[in-house]
Image (cartoon, helix red, strand yellow):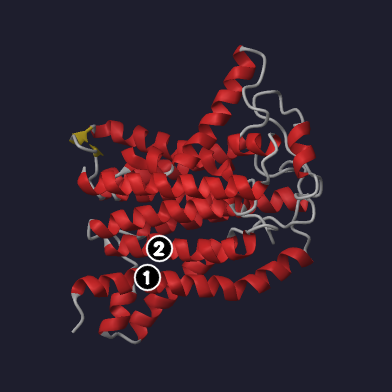
Amino acid sequence: MLDPGIIDVIKVFTPATLAFFIGILITPFISHFLYTHRMWKKKAGKKGLGDGGKDTPLFNELHKGKEVGTPKMGGVIIWISALLTILFLWVLANIYPTFITEKLSFLSRDQTWLPLFTLLVGAIIGLVDDYFEVSGKSDYFAGGLSLLKRLMLVFVVSIGGAWWFYEKLEVSSVIVPFVGAFDIGLLFIPFFIIVMLGIYSSGVIDGIDGLAGGVFAVIFSAYGVIAFSQSQINLAAFCFVLVGGLLAFLWFNIPPARFYMSETGSMALTMTLGVVAFLTEQVILLPLIAFPLLITTTSNIIQVASKKIRGKKVFLIAPIHHHFEAKGWPGYKVTMRYWVISIIAAILGIIIALIG
């Protein structure tokens, strides 16, 4: 008989491996669909933040040969491979119940229902946004859903998540490392919403080949390790099944990218990450574990504030990873260094979570 700890390790990493291979298998079909239907922006470039939506010539010059001809919606590989893995193991456990099949199924009300629901809602909203952006079939939604519309949708989903934590899971406290739990009562609800909106804003890290996929894989791995250390094995398995899907996506997203993650991936992952951080009670460590996401959002805020107050920019381009590109760093160098920073930040976060 295997040691229970070894069984838990198998439960966590088997679905992750399965999700990776499912992602690899479905990608040729998804890729064929995206290229056949020309699911890319019809005009390269983007509008700036905080400057009346003017064109960003420096960014457009750097990326003029990338955005047109490379499909968006590649993030569907991540959540479809995770969803298929979860459903396959759940169906297998119910149709052919054995010790092994029941152990491998990790769909549970207390640990995985909410993050799975959030993943799918974010994925669908993001998919609709991506579709409108690339199809051009709606004048009202030309260019996709506006930032305000997306923030409002995230806000609505966040209200539901906050209610679930507060009422269903009876969570109203926040754990501060080395200090302990602070019960903040009803303030937990607005705190949850603010965190969800903040983490969603970091989704703009998807802008260089391989960058977002690698960063998110490291972050979810870190929270998977933390969940495992808390004996939340189902949640740990959920985190690593997303890592499996992310690695499958990353296989095709490393330079030159076969497709981009875009909103259907980034919205699903950022919203789910917020929920996972609260489920592990390590949301205070989120800025450290997800440090690359933090600096992405912060650089945008600094850029917009500087334009408004000083009338000039701090960075050549925001977010900051594009600033490094504009300084002459090749995209792969920015990506690799972000991966290194992600790993170091994640390790530090895990250490603090384990000893704090």
Per the image, label 1 sits on a secondary structure element best described as helix
For residue 150, which quarter of the picture? top right
* Residue in view at x 25 percent, y 83 percent: 99
Residue 40, position in %: x, y?
75, 54
Residue 126, position in %: x, y?
59, 51
Q: Nearer the viewer, residue 143 or 236?
A: 236
Any part of residue 328 in sight = yes
Q: Which mark is residue 349?
A: none
Residue 36, position in %: x, y?
78, 67
Q: Are the two marked residues, 2 and 1, in contact with CB atoms closer than 8 angstroms? A: yes
Q: Please tell me how crowded label 2 is: few (under 14), some (14-19), or many (20+) other residues with Cα within 10 Å.
A: many
Q: Please tell me how crowded label 1 is: few (under 14), some (14-19), or many (20+) other residues with Cα within 10 Å.
A: some
For the view shown, which residue lies furthest in the top direction?
310
Would residue 90 appear left or right of 84 to someone viewing this image? left
Q: Nearer the viewer, residue 7 or 321?
A: 321
* Residue in view at x 32 percent, y 57 percent: 225
What quarter of the picture does the C terminus occupy? Answer: top left
> What kind of residue is marked 1?
Phe
Residue 350, position in %: x, y?
31, 49
Q: Which mark is residue 13?
A: 1
Q: Nearer the viewer, residue 97 or 164?
A: 97
For residue 13, which quarter of the picture? bottom left
Q: CA distance from mark 2 to mark 1?
A: 7 Å
> What kind of residue is marked 2?
Phe
For residue 108, which quarter of the picture? bottom left
* Residue in view at x 35 percent, y 65 percent: 237
- Residue designated by label 2: 240
* Residue in view at x 67 percent, y 14 percent: 311
Residue 305 lies, with reference to residue 263, above or below; the image says: above
